[in-house]
Amino acid sequence: MTLILVAGTAPSAGATTVAAGLAHRLAYAGHNVCVERLAGDIRASADAAVFAALEFADSTGAPIDAPTDTAGAVTIVEVPAGGDAASLATRFGAKLVLVGSSVDAPAGATVIINHAATTGLRAIGEDRLLAAPTVRQLIEASGAQVLTRSQAGEAAVCEHLIIGAISHDPADTYFNRFPRRAVIARAEKVDLALAALGTGSECLILTGGHEPSPYILDRAASERRTTLLVAPGGTVETMRDLEGTFGTASFSGEAKVDRIGGLMRVALDDATVAALLA
């Protein structure tokens, strides 16, 4: 069994993101891959669920106490942050990948700098999509009421937060400039709401605490392309509530998996991959 441990130098360093990206890199290079999460902290179950959703790798979907032999597969195990990852690697006979913004690594470890200025060899740059919140996180941050859910539901990622149409462009043209968007507008701005729905926005947040026009509600419910929310505060207050969701969002979802897979193809060259598998 080829075993690789992935550890963050601190919580939220990006170990889950890198473990999923490493699995993607190896799977699409032709290797059978298994991804697991070592038990030991409160994040273990959520991280294990992320790995269970990966279509290109096997996983038990629950935290494990120790790696088990998976014949013919490369096993990647994320370990809790802040522990003695080097000792665990020695104990399990594993290669070690350390993830952080600044890493003082033991001999033999592969270091991946996360939140780097740009993506390059063994470095993952800051990325808007990876930092983006889900609709669920926008609901929690704004205290909004859910009126209708899209087919993608609350797991949809919102890469851009857009306030109305504040340019000379028509609303449809303006909104379409921003992929994976949440539109924030006053509840009485029916024209903006219709444009947000018509362009397939992931989320429409109506501010001011007012119920929308029944026409808006019926259209959102029938098309199911956009999750429709009503926030209790005004537009400015709602935007302030949502600002902190970027960069604190947990790693999950197909869009983020595809993005880290692409970034890891740049960050891990063939020589680094060969060293991890040796």
Image (spheres, grey):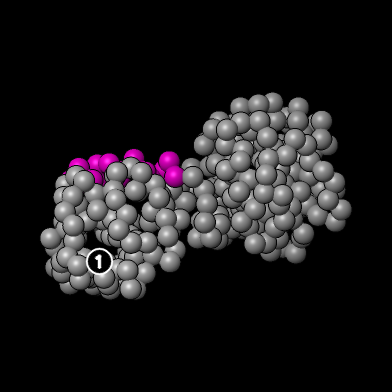
Judge from the rendering whether residue 22 lies leftward or rightward of residue 65; answer left or right: left
Task: Identify the residue under disc 1.
Answer: 217
**Up-down: is 278 above or below 96?**
below
Residue 92 place in picture, x, y as percent: 81, 35
Q: Nearer the viewer, residue 111 or 226?
A: 226
Q: Nearer the viewer, residue 202 or 209?
A: 209
**Residue at the image point whose x is 76% and y is 27% from the top:** 87
**Residue 114 highlighted magenta (yes or no):** no
**Residue at the image point whose x is 49% and y is 45% from the top:** 250
**Residue 240 highlighted magenta (yes or no):** yes
**Up-down: is 261 above or below 238?**
below
Q: Which kind of residue does numbered mark 1 sit on?
A: Leu
Write down the region rendered in magenta. Answer: 235-249
Q: Nearer the viewer, residue 158 or 190?
A: 190
Residue 186 place in picture, x, y as percent: 16, 56
Is the stretch drawn in magenta largely helix, strand or loop? helix
Residue 273 place in picture, x, y as percent: 72, 52
**Up-down: is 226 above or below 146?**
below
**Residue at the image point whose x is 30% and y is 58% from the top:** 147
Residue 254 place in picture, x, y as percent: 53, 60
Element assignment for label 1: helix
Residue 95 in sight in this render: yes
Judge from the rendering whether residue 211 lies leftward or rightward of residue 19; answer left or right: left
Judge from the rendering whether residue 59 lies leftward or rightward of residue 203; answer left or right: right
